[in-house]
Image (cartoon, rainbow, N blue to C red):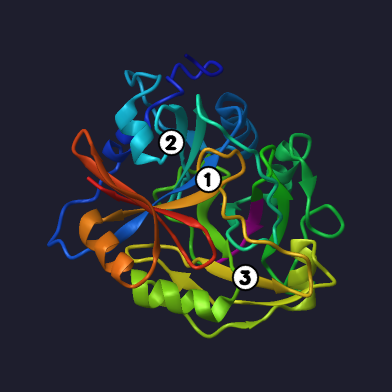
Amino acid sequence: MKLGSSGWTLFLPLCCLATLAAPARAETSGRILRPNAVLHSVADVERSAAFYRDAVGLTMEPSAGFPTGASPRIGTAFGTPGATIRAATFSIPGSDVRLTLVQFSGVPASPIRQRLQDPGSVKLIVRVRNIDAAFERVRGRIARVYTDGGAPMKPEGPAAVNTSVIMRDPDGYPLELVLQDVPEISSAVPATSNVVGGWATFIVGDVAASIEFYRTRLGFESVGTPRPLAAMVLALQGTPDATGSMSAGVRPPGGVNTWRMYDFRNIDRARLDSRLQDPGTPAVSFWVDSVAALVARLKDGGVAIAVDPVQIDGTTRAFVRDLNGLLLEFVEP
């Protein structure tokens, strides 16, 4: 099945995604090696893929020759026995993380409506060269703009270089476009690409507790100490009456970009805790050197295991939940 005129096959079983950019194997100890992808469960993968390809400007990865349809083994690996799975993966120029859109059918599903402030949400950040041009491309195809004023703003004040705007994509996922002058744009990014980077932001119940979880359990590096959310940052999120805090930054093992964590207070919020097959459910995927070793260690530490390790065509994967209910996928090539 094709999408548009790209000539690339759109749908691929997720067991095959791991073959696209697998890191070299090192000594195994249950370590995260580097980020893999932000996962979005969607109701219509073709529609969602068109948005991220045509409006956002991400690059769909060639995937010719992969079959579609149901596989008991694939369904078991994602906690959805009997499901038919279709997916599309996008690389993000200048980024160490990809975007994977996943559609499940043949199993019960309950669409969820996540809000930006809900713990367990994941905001995809896309860095661009020209934010006005990028926003103009998406504004007619998004569900809403969160940012006060409905347009890009400078969350660090009028004299700041950084400019951002946060919106809800057609599937309800938070998406932020950002213009910033540091770090330097990678020389590997094509000069013709307006997209020059990308990373993820976690919405959590408590920033300090979440940093400790990711630092001690998963080896993330903490950059600085948490700080209160300034009024202009809250306006950027579209939550001007809330309070909250944010991490100065956390860096996944093997990661190039610094990610962030936010918590929101004095505003209605609820943990997502949804299933992967439910449209609107986010997940974050990481390459690891040993899924079995990492899952065993996390299980001994009381971390909830959502899907036990399963091997498919030489690739092992599993899902756990962090303390905010967010699904984390571990993939071992």
Q: What's the residue type where badge 2 is placed? A: Thr
Q: In this view, does 189 lie to the left or right of 149?
A: left
Quadrant, the C terminus: top left
Question: What distance separates the C-alpha of mark 1 from that of mark 3?
Answer: 22 Å
Callout 2 crowding tier (Cα within 10 Å): few <14, some 14–19, many ≥20: many
The answer to if 331 sits in the magenta stretch is no
> Which residue: 32% across, 18% down?
65
Q: Residue 262 carries which label?
A: 3
Q: How many labels does the image show?
A: 3
Query: Mark 2 against mark 3, which lies toward the viewer?
Result: 2
Q: 107 and 60: which one is in front?
A: 107
Q: What's the residue type where badge 1 is placed? A: Arg
Q: Is residue 89 left or right of residue 241?
A: left
> Which residue: 65% across, 34% down?
55
The answer to if 177 sits in the magenta stretch is yes
Q: 282 and 168: which one is in front?
A: 282
Quadrant hosting residue 295: bottom left
> Which residue: 65% across, 54% down?
176
Query: Which residues lie in the magenta part?
Result: 175-182
Q: Is residue 52 left or right of residue 297?
A: right
Q: Regarding mark 3 in the picture, which secondary structure is present there? A: strand
Q: Which mark is residue 253?
A: none
Name the magenta segment's main secondary structure: strand
Instruction: Report which residue position mark 1 lands on.
Output: 275
Q: In this view, does 311 lie above or below 60?
A: below
Instruction: Report which residue position mark 2 lands on.
Output: 80
Disc nearer the start of the sequence (2/3): 2
Question: What distance separates the C-alpha of mark 1 from that of mark 2?
Answer: 9 Å
